[in-house]
């Protein structure tokens, strides 16, 4: 009598008991990794607050810091690039698809000529 009969599919086999064993081994490995993890985490302390580049978290009802404030140095360093590119971004999906298909057609043309 075959203790672990398998379902032959043509692409391999399916045996639920083997897959349950693999799943159990994966759970044991995950549990071992979890037990060796950092145990100093405490709910309701400063550890649970989001890090906003050293800025304090705004109180309820206050305006939240925008990305322009957090990335001011980055955008200021690339000001020349952003001054040319930002007007091209209209937020309309049709415009983005037109750019995508136009560049794709240009690349296909270039590859076809080479």
Image: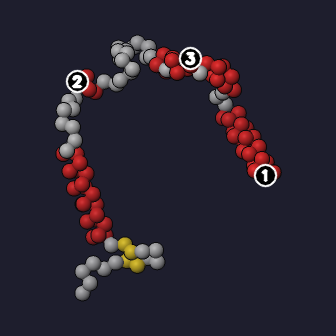
Q: Residue at x 46, y 19 (%)?
A: 70
Q: Position of residue 73 (x, y in %)?
A: 51, 17
- One can see residue 66 in this view: no
- Which residue is the site of mark 2? 45
Image depth: mark 2 or mark 3 in front: 3
Q: Residues within 10 Å of mark 3 (few under 14, many from 20)?
A: few
Please, is residue 100 above or below residue 65 in the view?
Answer: below
Can residue 57 be seen in the rendering of this structure? yes
Q: Is residue 36 left or right of residue 5?
A: left
The residue shown at (66%, 25%) is 85
Secondary structure beneath disc 2? Answer: loop
Please tell me whether mark 3 sits on a helix, a strand or a loop.
helix
Question: Distance between the Cα atoms at labels 1 and 3?
Answer: 39 Å
Percent coordinates x, y for residue 72 in the rendering: 51, 17
**Mark 1 or mark 2, which is nearer to you?**
1
Residue 76: mark:
3
Q: Earlier in the sequence, mark 1 or mark 2?
A: 2
Q: Is residue 34 above or below residue 55?
A: below
Q: Position of residue 52 (x, y in %)?
A: 38, 21
N-terminal of the pair, mark 2 or mark 3, is 2
Residue annotated with mark 1: 114
Quarter of the rendering containing residue 63: top left
């Amino acid at each position: 009598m075959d203790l672990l009969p398998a379902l032959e599919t043509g692409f391999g086999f399916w045996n639920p008991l083997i897959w349950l064993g693999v799943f159990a081994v994966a759970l044991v490995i995950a549990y071992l990794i979890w037990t060796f993890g950092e145990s100093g985490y405490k709910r309701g302390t400063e550890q649970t607050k989001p890090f906003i580049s050293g800025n304090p978290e705004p109180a309820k009802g206050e305006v939240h810091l925008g990305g322009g404030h957090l990335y001011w140095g980055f955008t200021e360093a690339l000001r020349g690039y952003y001054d040319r590119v930002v007007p091209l971004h209209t937020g309309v999906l049709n415009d983005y698809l037109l750019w995508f298909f136009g560049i794709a057609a240009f690349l296909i043309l270039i590859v076809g000529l080479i």
